[in-house]
Amino acid sequence: MIKNLQDTVTLHNGIKMPGFGLGVFKVEEGPELVKAVKVAIKHGYRSIDTAAIYGNEEGVGQGIREGLQEAGISREEVFDTSKVLMN
């Protein structure tokens, strides 16, 4: 059962994935998005959920890069999940 930011679920390949993540649906590109991602990482979020259709991937990427640097953690510690639209 997922109760806090540090709880994980184990995937079929054995990788542990965070049970909670920051969703960025309807968050527009810009400094607020970058700050939101950075603050989430600073406060323990290790999963950011986005999608190309949201149109905010640049800000999410910048927020992840800056957040990792400020928190002093490696890129391998953060999941960036996205959706694939198939017709």
Image (cartoon, helix red, strand yellow):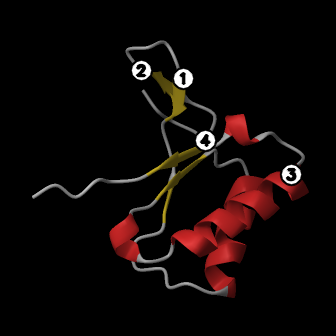
Which SS class for mark 1?
Answer: strand
Of circles 4 and 3, the one toward us is 3
Residue 14 vertical position relative to residue 31 in the rendered view, above or below: above
- Which residue in the protein does label 2 denote? 11
Quadrant position of the C terminus in the picture: bottom left
Q: Tag 2 or tag 4, which sits nearer the N-term?
A: 4
Three-letter residue code for mark 4:
Leu
Q: Position of residue 46 (x, y in %)?
A: 63, 44
Q: Tag 3 or tag 4, which sits nearer the N-term?
A: 4
Q: CA distance from mark 4 to mark 3?
A: 16 Å
Snapshot quadrant of residue 26: bottom left
Residue 87 vertical position relative to residue 59 in the rendered view, above or below: above
Q: Residue 16: give its label.
A: 1
Q: CA distance from mark 2 to mark 1?
A: 6 Å
Graded by Cα atoms within 10 Å as few (under 14), some (14 to 19) or many (20 or more), the crowding at tag 2 reads few
Of circles 1 and 4, the one toward us is 1
Q: Residue 71: give its label.
A: 3
Q: Tag 3 or tag 1, which sits nearer the N-term?
A: 1
